Image (spheres, grey):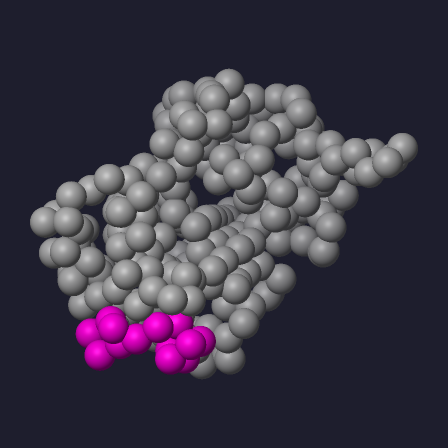
Amino acid sequence: MAQIELDHIDRIFRLGDSEVHALRDVTLRIEPGEYVAVMGPSGSGKSTLLNLLGLLDRPNAGAYRLEGRDVTTLSADEQAAVRSARIGFVFQSFHLVPRLSAAENIGLPLVLAGVPAAERAPRIAQAVKDFGLEGRARHRPDELSGGQRQRVAIARATIMRPAMLLADEPTGNLDRATGHEVTALLEALNAAGTTLIVVTHDPAMGARARRRILMEDGAIRQDQRAAAAAPEAPDAVSAPPPR
């Protein structure tokens, strides 16, 4: 069974008297554990698609089934519960809470999910170790480098052990070397079984995915699978073990 099933999805935004068709009749299947890059020019619908997959938005028409469940008909609270349990997000701008330490940012989803403190502490400690942040756990975001902030963001995105990770331009604010490091970390998580869907303008990052989807004018124009294995990782990074 496909993990993600989209059938004839439309998303229309109304701006005054005009309509913008952000997504047009999008039908898509993604299997568990896939590594997918979504590419296309600005305004092509990439981020709108990612928002729908992450249950941050709803379609005007069509159906979205996640792990066999129609999630388009769920209430806002029900969607939030699914999002918390099954979906992780990594953004270009990190979106860390400025007044919280790295460890506190990582553990925030556990707090919001009501996980007891006695259970949170070891899981946060393990995540800090897995993502190489032992010396920075007590530092606030403004005391971290860009790469360290993105590591915190990825650790936070995976602390709930999601089935899929949605990354919107995850290397967009990073220098090339740090971007390679973050790419390797995401690929290690994918190699450990997490479905990875990346929106990117970077052709080099897109070429690394085993499946590439090209969007134009809100529609899928190309859907290509790599004939061979993914390119060699830019850095050797081991996948963090399940927590």
Q: Nearer the viewer, residue 125 or 222?
A: 125
Q: Nearer the viewer, residue 29 or 173?
A: 173
Q: Residue furthest front?
A: 99
Q: Report whether residue 27 is seen.
A: no
Residue 14, image x and y in percent?
79, 34
Residue 215, image x and y in percent?
67, 46
Does residue 131 show up magenta in the picture? no
The residue at 41%/21% (across/down) is 69
Horizontal arrangement in the rendering, residue 210 relative to residue 57 (left or right): left
The residue at 72%/39% (across/down) is 22
Horizontal arrangement in the rendering, residue 58 relative to residue 227 (left or right): right
Q: Residue furthest right?
A: 17
Query: Image height check: is 214 above or below 151?
Result: above
The residue at 37%/27% (across/down) is 67
Q: Report whether residue 167 is seen.
A: yes
Query: Image height check: is 215 above or below 140?
Result: above
Query: Image height check: is 163 above or below 141?
Result: above
- Image quarter for residue 162? top left
Q: Which residues are magenta?
A: 134-146
Quarter of the N terminus within the rendering = top left
The residue at 41%/61% (across/down) is 97
- Image quarter for residue 100? bottom left
Residue 166, image x and y in percent?
46, 49
